Amino acid sequence: MRKLKYLSHLEPFLKVPFFTIEEAARQGIPKHALAYLEKRGDLERIYPGAYRFHEYEPKVEFQWENLGLITSSVPESVICLISALVFYDLTDQVMREIWLAVPHKSHPPKRPNTRIVRMRNIDLGKTAITLGEYHVQIFDRERCIIDAFRYLSKEIAIKALQRYFQSKTAKPDPKKLGAYAKKLRVNITPYILSCTT
């Protein structure tokens, strides 16, 4: 059958975490062929407009696989809030959704179980990390704490701040925390004093 011939055209995507309909089209593979190959079990549809081979084995720890996959599929996104706090072990919250920040004027694609937050100053505290084969952006620990005070409950934010100062693996940087708070117009001085005195 002709549609099976398209499998050989898909060979460049055998070892990638996902590929889009647009990338497949550049290889001469139409949408209907992808749908057929998915129905046959050769491909797995991971979200609207993206596929991967069924036998693909992710090279990332299971707990971070979805975070890496979704983040890398949303242009200009930065891991933030609950997802970032979980990554840095600054919260007891469970990551039921993936939290991503995007530039204020962007129009990101929808993804399952993902909460998109439009933010200004998106470059402040942005840093690159690698989750297996995914190269993604995340806010640093200090930006995560300031954003927790801006967007999440006081209880979650205070707990994150306490863990930040109690951390044995990463040294706290109160100056950077203060600079971010000033830039983002958040007064957390009383909370810092209660954690450090």
Image (cartoon, grey):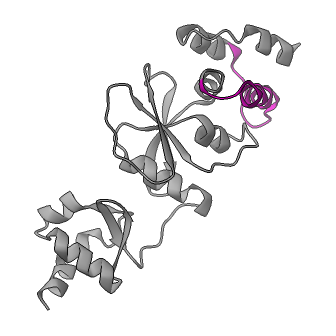
Q: Nearer the viewer, residue 188 or 16?
A: 188
Magenta stretch, overall SS: helix
Q: Residue furthest bottom?
A: 1
Indicate whether 91 appears above or below 160. below
Name the residue at 31% across, 61% down. 50
Image coordinates for residue 84, horizontal then vertical, percent: 60, 39
Rendered view: 66 above or below 98: below
> Which image quarter holds the C terminus?
top right
Residue 129 placement, left or right of 94: left
What percent of the width, then of the height, locates residue 28?
Answer: 10, 69
In magenta, the rendered stretch is: 151-174
Q: Above or below — where is 56 with respect to 111?
A: below
Asked whether residue 156 is in view, the answer is yes
- Quadrant that contains the N terminus: bottom left
**Residue 164 horizontal/vertical position (percent):** 75, 29
Image spot of residue 86 (x, y percent) = 66, 43
